[in-house]
Amino acid sequence: MAPMAGYTDRAFRQLIYENGLDHAVTEMVSAKALCFNDRKTLELLQKFPGEKNTGVQIFASDVESISKASYLLNDFDFSYIDINMGCPAPKIVKNGCGSALIKNPNLVYELVKGAVKNSNKKISIKTRKSFDNTLSLDIIRAAQDAGAFAVTVHPRSREEYYKNKSDWQYLIKIKKFLTIPLIGNGDILTVEDALYKIKKYDVDGIAIGRGAIENPLIFSQIKKALKGEKYEELNFNQRIDILLRHLYLEVNYKGQRQAILNMRKTYAYYLKNLKNSKEIRNKLNVENDYTKVVKILEEYREQMR
């Protein structure tokens, strides 16, 4: 599962692991804040009991922060470290981080080299297609040369954010010179999307973000489809059950107030295209009590029988 700021916390990762996920990445973590032992940053590093096969994603634009954070993460039980070189958010880009690094392959080489030198974990990067018409090919080469074990690419430009269709043809250019695994990311919203992209673009793996929020069963469905087995579409009752489970996990880890605030941005995904969903979302978005939120959802279930 692809890292998504504000979404891939330990509650959501646990939910998706329970529904067939094999591998995930944390929310984006500031390497500099980690170096200062920031409380909120450390909270982002918390895992659910028994969590395995999860990478941690960090960001910074200076070698010292990346190197020190990579060293500090030796004491954390993550499978690998991923360096974000694709985030398009203005507050990240203005500090030279995220997708701004696409324009600086020499710095990318030093960042990855510093992480590799100081970490007991494997290092990867996640990037985009381009920034200000500068393609990411050079930073991908630099990351590989510096010792990265894998690269994930979301083939949209920084300027596109999440608009327009992702350009998976771009991944073919990367495949021509890359000797490490290439993970494709972007516009994988259905099982059919996944199967088509895996076959057509010969990627070594896929990373799914928004598609997993809309359909938390997508990973188990893809695994069955790859084996030639039939899979069931996500039905109404499953949507409500999964939403209730997600809500429970968030409350368990963050407490009622913070959990319910966090969940409001996900209601639209879970209830997308369902009958009377707008009315239900309006009720959920003004309710702050966990038991009352559960009651609204259970009453909605009964109403739709």
Image (tube, rainbow, N blue to C red):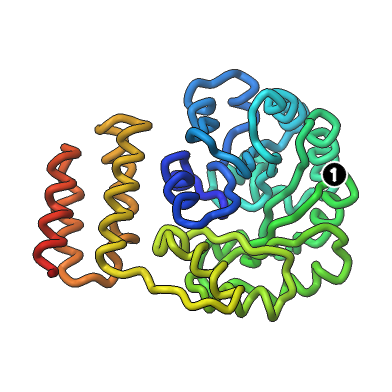
Task: Work out which residue is located at the far top of the displayed protein and give it.
Answer: 37
Is residue 165 placed above or below 137 in the rendered structure? below
- Closer-to-camera residue (139/227): 227
Q: How many residues crowd around disc 1 within 10 Å: few (fewer than 14), some, or many (20 or more)?
A: many
Image position, residue 269 (x, y; %): 34, 61
Towards the viewer: 133 or 183:
183
Q: Quadrant of the N terminus?
A: bottom right
Q: Is residue 132 visible?
A: no
Local SS, label 1 = helix
- Tag 1: amino acid: Tyr
Q: As rendered, which of 228 and 246 lies closer to the eye?
A: 228
Q: Quadrant of the image for the C terminus?
A: bottom left
- Horizontal arrangement in the rendering, residue 6 relative to residue 22 (left or right): left
Counting from the top left corner in percent of width and height, residue 64 is at 76, 27
- In-image side of 220 versus 135 (left or right): left
Give the number of callouts: 1
Say which residue label 1 marks: 109
Residue at image position (33%, 42%) is 262
Residue 69: name its quadrant: top right
- Rendered image quadrant of residue 118: top right
Indicate whether 159 appears above or below 230. Answer: above
Is residue 226 visible from the viewing direction of this image?
Answer: yes
